[in-house]
Image (cartoon, grey):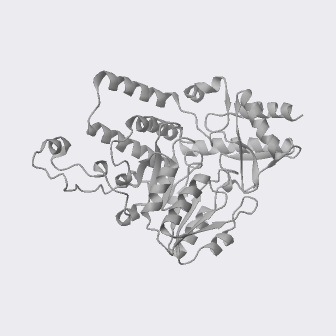
Amino acid sequence: MLREEFPVLERTVYLNTAGYGLVPRRAVGKIVSTVRRLLEEGPWNSSFEEKILNEARREAAKLIGAKAEEVFFTTSTTTGLSKVVTMVGLKKGDNVVSFDLEFPGVASVVKTYCSKVGCEVRVVRHRNGFYSVEDIEKAVDEKTKAIVASSVQWVNGLVMPLKEMREIADRVGAYLILDSIQHIGAIKFNVNEIKPDFAVAGGEKWLLSTWFGVGLAYVRKELLSELEGPPYGLHDMEEPAETWSQYWFNPDKDCWKLLKLKKTAARFEWAGTPPMLGVLGFMESLKLLNEIGINKIHYHNLSLKEKLINIITELNGEIVSFTENKGEWSGITTFKSKNISLKEHYNIVAELKKRNIIVAARGAGGLGGIRVSPHLYNTVDDLEKLFEVIKGLTR
């Protein structure tokens, strides 16, 4: 049974995957057994590392419909996004278009880097949580170098108008850069349909890899030859023809003669020794997601959302940025009660936590409420338990 992979569910109603995802038993088991083997047998060689990294990249690529050569690993969304922003060649006179409900980490990366190089940041304002395609079109011009956005917004859970954003970016020759941490693993995300130039997702939410320190990044294959990465390290290089073992032994080698760069996105990965324990755990979580299948996960999560909406409506609550268009739905639903102040919602979340029911209080841009984010391990029963307690707290 799937829920057995997540023992914490025996005592907790956990509905905050948009904050942190639960880690499956199998991922922890893989890390523990590897640590034990490391303790008893010592560290392995680089061929083992490369084999595991290649396998993990294939699992990540499968989840998003990409090729393994288009995937590289990063420690977090913010780290991956920072790397991408530095690679696209922003300079003085350029502008970057983004959105006012963006996660603060996105805003921090864009604003600090643009301040450094002298490019302009243009922020599109929401209309009750929604973004008008017309407003986005007005924000861009021939000097727009990138459109940077969360593909799913963290406060209200709305899927952005990604098809239209791709078309707008193409018209002005801009990169489409996506923070997809609230998207990948939760609902369908296929790079061949969305067509981003870059997409980044930390592992700690819907990818079920909290505290592993590993996430995935995608870069469109056609861009690989034109991007300049950060300073490269040995792990970004191809194995020498003589093999690594002979390379290290060769007394005549010139240490200042650079090896050939990898031709794949892996050259943007860790320049030095990778965090292999995190990669192993991340790979096991990716395998679980792929075994279940993202289509099945997508429909499960949206069916829970539909149930959530029905319950909230019956209780005369208000969905933040509600739409009947299921194409804009994600695994996140934020709501508020019409009978109490917004501040009291924060107190309700704290009271729920005392009763081992975990949700979140979230807000930005004048929007806010209680954010509920069930995942593949949740059931309708979890939702009913949540609102049974909420009804008691708000009487």
**Residue 350 falls in which quadrant of the image?**
top right
Residue at position x 49%, y 64% in the image: 116
Residue 194 shows up from this direction? no
Q: Residue at x 40, y 42 (%)?
A: 56
Instruction: Return the residue found at the far front.
Output: 116
Q: Which quadrant is home to the N terminus? A: top right
Of 378 and 223, which appears nearest the observer?
Answer: 223
Q: Residue 13 in the image: x percent, y percent?
A: 69, 30
Residue 47 picture location, percent across and down: 26, 39
In the displayed structure, 343 sits above or below 357; it is below
Q: Is residue 106 left or right of residue 367?
A: left
Q: Is residue 186 left or right of residue 371?
A: left
Residue 6 placement (x, y as % from top left): 57, 28
Residue that extends furthest to the top in the rendered view of this protein: 40
Q: Quadrant of residue 310?
A: top right
Percent across and percent down for residue 311 are 80, 40
Total count of labels: 0
In this rendering, position of residue 65 left or right of residue 307: left
